[in-house]
């Protein structure tokens, strides 16, 4: 019973909604004018003549433009009606612009024209400062957001690079372990050279045959031993030329032989003379 009652109520609601929609589609009847209404056509025309422009008045006083509507517009269609108003206003503006230009009448606002403002200058300065402060806050917030995004992106890139390096390092270690294992299993067989072993990825381990410039074969110091040897030779040549340092003034000091030419000068008399002089 309850199901039947619910279905009946639903059918009743559907029928009411359908009847309402049909009534909306029908034309709305206007109210009939009352019997006491007065329709004086002559008085209306006289009043229209009083308020209308004279026929000989110049166009610059009324600035009226008549636009012919070529297509018929449905007044009940809001979109079409508003579009018709827009096209009429646009066309009338174009015609008035051309007409004023041809007449040479000034109709544009001068560049130095300032209208009276409702708000004072001090109030507008405060409003401008507040707007600039809000704009500055928005820009700073946007910069902070961009900085956070770039920092987060940099962290993600760094983490990805770290993972890739760790993965590459692990692969290299596993590759070296496999190579050592294969080398041990082969028993170091060969003609004295390292045997070539192919790994699972198809790569072959080969000792590099490139020679570094300035490094002697078998030099594990990377050429530093040669540099030290060259430095030693250079030091020896300088020592032989300039000596080993230390006190050097005695080498050029005068002696008795160089001073008196070896003529047998009496040292005692010289000393006695010195004592007498003292």
Image (cartoon, rainbow, N blue to C red):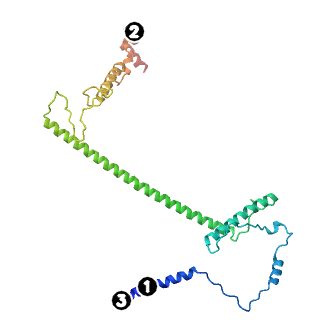
The residues tagged by marks 3 and 1 sit, at their Cα atoms, a distance apart of: 14 Å
Which residue sits at x=31%, y=48%? Answer: 164
Secondary structure at numbered mark 1: helix
Q: Can residue 108 be seen by looking at this rendering?
A: no
Q: Quadrant of residue 195?
A: top left
Please name the residue that numbered disc 2 is placed on: 261
Q: Is residue 242 above or below residue 181?
A: above
Taking the image as shown, residue 109 lies to the left or right of residue 57, namely left
Q: Quadrant of the C terminus?
A: top left
Mark found first going from the N terminus, 3 or 1: 3
Q: Residues within 10 Å of mark 3 (few under 14, many from 20)?
A: few
Q: Relative to the observer, which residue lies in front, 213 or 14? A: 14
Location of residue 178 in the rendering, given as x and y in whole percent from the top left corner: 19, 41
Which residue sits at x=45%, y=86%? Answer: 12
The residues tagged by marks 2 and 1 sit, at their Cα atoms, a distance apart of: 153 Å
Q: Quadrant of the N terminus?
A: bottom left
Location of residue 77 in the rendering, given as x and y in whole percent from the top left corner: 61, 72
The residues tagged by marks 3 and 2 sit, at their Cα atoms, a distance apart of: 155 Å
Mark found first going from the N terminus, 3 or 2: 3
Please name the residue that numbered disc 3 is placed on: 2
Q: Relative to the observer, which residue lies in front, 122 or 21? A: 21
Q: Nearer the viewer, mark 3 or mark 1?
A: 1
Q: Residues within 10 Å of mark 2 (few under 14, many from 20)?
A: few
Secondary structure at numbered mark 3: helix
Q: Relative to the observer, which residue lies in front, 155 or 182? A: 182
Q: Any mark on residue 222, and which?
A: none
Q: Nearer the viewer, mark 3 or mark 2?
A: 3
Q: Any mark on residue 11, and which?
A: 1
Q: Can residue 133 be seen by looking at this rendering?
A: yes
Q: Is residue 183 above or below residue 62?
A: above
Taking the image as shown, residue 114 lies to the left or right of residue 136, namely right
Q: Relative to the observer, which residue lies in front, 23 or 248? A: 23
């Amino acid at each position: 019973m309850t199901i039947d009652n619910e279905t009946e109520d639903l059918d009743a609601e559907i029928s009411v909604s359908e009847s309402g929609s049909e009534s909306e589609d029908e034309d709305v009847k206007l109210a009939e004018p009352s019997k006491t209404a007065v329709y004086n056509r002559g008085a209306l025309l006289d009043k229209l003549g009083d308020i209308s422009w004279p026929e000989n008045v110049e166009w610059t006083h009324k600035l009226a433009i008549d636009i012919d509507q070529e297509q018929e517009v449905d007044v009940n269609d809001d979109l079409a009606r508003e579009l018709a108003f827009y096209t009429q206003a646009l066309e009338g503006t174009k015609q008035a612009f051309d007409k004023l230009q041809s007449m040479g009448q000034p109709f544009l606002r001068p560049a130095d024209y300032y209208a009276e403002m409702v708000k004072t200058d001090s109030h507008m300065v405060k409003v401008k400062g507040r707007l600039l402060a809000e704009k500055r806050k928005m820009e700073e917030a946007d910069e902070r957001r961009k900085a956070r995004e770039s920092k987060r992106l940099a962290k993600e890139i760094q983490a990805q690079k770290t993972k890739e390096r760790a993965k590459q390092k692990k692969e290299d270690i596993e590759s070296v372990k496999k190579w050592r294992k294969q080398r041990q299993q082969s028993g170091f067989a060969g003609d004295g050279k390292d045997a070539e072993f192919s790994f699972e990825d198809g790569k072959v381990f080969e000792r590099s045959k490139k020679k570094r410039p300035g490094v002697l074969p078998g030099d594990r110091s990377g050429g530093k031993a040669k540099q030290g040897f060259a430095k030693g030779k250079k030091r020896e040549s300088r020592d032989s030329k300039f000596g080993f340092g230390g006190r050097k003034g005695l080498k050029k000091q005068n002696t008795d032989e160089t001073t008196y030419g070896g003529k047998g000068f009496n040292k005692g008399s010289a000393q006695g003379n010195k004592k007498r002089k003292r």
